[in-house]
Amino acid sequence: MYAEKEKTFETLVKSTLSRRLLKLFFATSLFNFGYNFVTTLEYVNFRQIMGIIGFTSATKISILLGISLIALCFGALIGGYISDKIKTRYGQRAPLIFIGTLLASSFFLIIPLMTQYTKKLQVIYPLLLGIFVLLHLSLGAAYSPWLALVADLFKKEERTAAGISINIFSAIGAAIAAILFSKLIDIGQSWIIWIITGLVLLISGVFTTILIPKENYYFEVTEVENSQLRNVLGLIWNYGGVVWVLLLIVNLLWAFSSHLIETGVVDSLIERFIVSDTKASFSSNILMGVYIVILLFPALWLINKIGKIRASILTSLLYSVFCILLSTMQNFNAIFYIVFIGGACNILLSTLQIALPADIVPKNRVASFMGMFFVFGTAVKPLATFIQGLLLENKEVNTSLSNFGGYPWVFLIAAIVCISTIILLLGILQIEKNSQSTLDEKIKEK
């Protein structure tokens, strides 16, 4: 299952530089460039932007973001199912990617019109909630077909490199967004952020739609299979087996932990050490992005050297250390070395979250299963957001673990959750070994 021999690092680099792969890497990765403008807005700068509008309650902000993430999950499930079922002249993936990003971008452009010309907070909040639900349903419907491209377009030995490529564009997008958004917040023009995010998302989605191959990855679906769609858990078990179930739980725990970090690092520096939004973003997200670029090829080498499962175990351990360092830091300058570890963790984790499930996804359910993988990672984020809101309410400035609550405890919980994934990953590794032993025995018998 996992035990096919990986190509040597040198051979992999050479194949990565082929014209075909470079075109596919660019076409696939471009969508995530725009998507990271969305995640930067919602995970890094959301509390500051909402505070400028007039919403300062950590719990209320968490509820808004949490409901939006639930809508994103439903959109991903619907988009994945439709993408696997349809067969059009434009292929299976392109129509949903185009329509979803077009709708999501349109909703982003509506938000500043509402917040600029309506000052009543009791009116803005329910309107904003409704727009965010529709926006995230559309975005989720585009995301599942896009994620399926990793399994559709790339061979097993190419997927780690594809994940690295996607993360390069992600890092660039997040870095540009962080710089722009922080500057706009500091000069009091945060409303422009909605427009920038909508336009960049639209351009990225349109170009990805144009550049990807227009193919239909069609497989015959029986009536039995159709009836199983009513039972999601049964579908996962029958087609993915115990390995896929364990992997979904691992992704859920990874996402819970990383969401607490992504949504808390910048704001924690602002609240705990009284620095500007721009300074906090540069010293954490921007610097981490630089480290990610530096560590790209070492990460590619490591994953292919020790295998995706062992690399995942190492990543969970390192990410836990990163979280603990964030929870115990006592001065602002400590962030400069802490984010080096964070950069290593982020490039490994984000690459494995793409490459690992693509290796084992059932071929007749690519978009559906990749969508489920995304949903399991996203569905837990509202819970993480809600817990974060409870821990932060009126305790944002807490700088020590000695007092319960605040960012130190948010990051400590992230560490505990992340390190628990090691047990599940060891179980997957053992199943892999058993499967390989069985395969070797059958080969000997023949």
Image: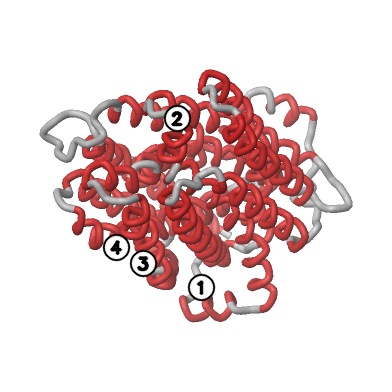
The kind of residue tagged 2 is: Gly
Q: Are marks 4 and 1 in contact (CB under 8 Å)?
A: no
Where, by quadrant of the figure, is residue 203 drawn?
Answer: bottom right
Instruction: Name the N-terminal-most of marks 2 and 3.
Output: 2
Q: Which residue is mark 1?
A: 7
Q: Which residue is mark 3?
A: 291
Q: Nearer the viewer, mark 2 or mark 3?
A: 2
The residue sitting at 75% across, 44% down in the picture is 96
Marks 3/1: CA–CA distance: 26 Å
Instruction: Name the N-terminal-most of marks 3 and 1.
Output: 1
Q: Which residue is mark 4?
A: 340
Label 2: state its secondary structure. loop
Q: Are marks 2 and 4 in contact (CB under 8 Å)?
A: no
Q: Are marks 2 and 3 in contact (CB under 8 Å)?
A: no
Marks 1/2: CA–CA distance: 55 Å
Quadrant where the image shows the C terminus: bottom right
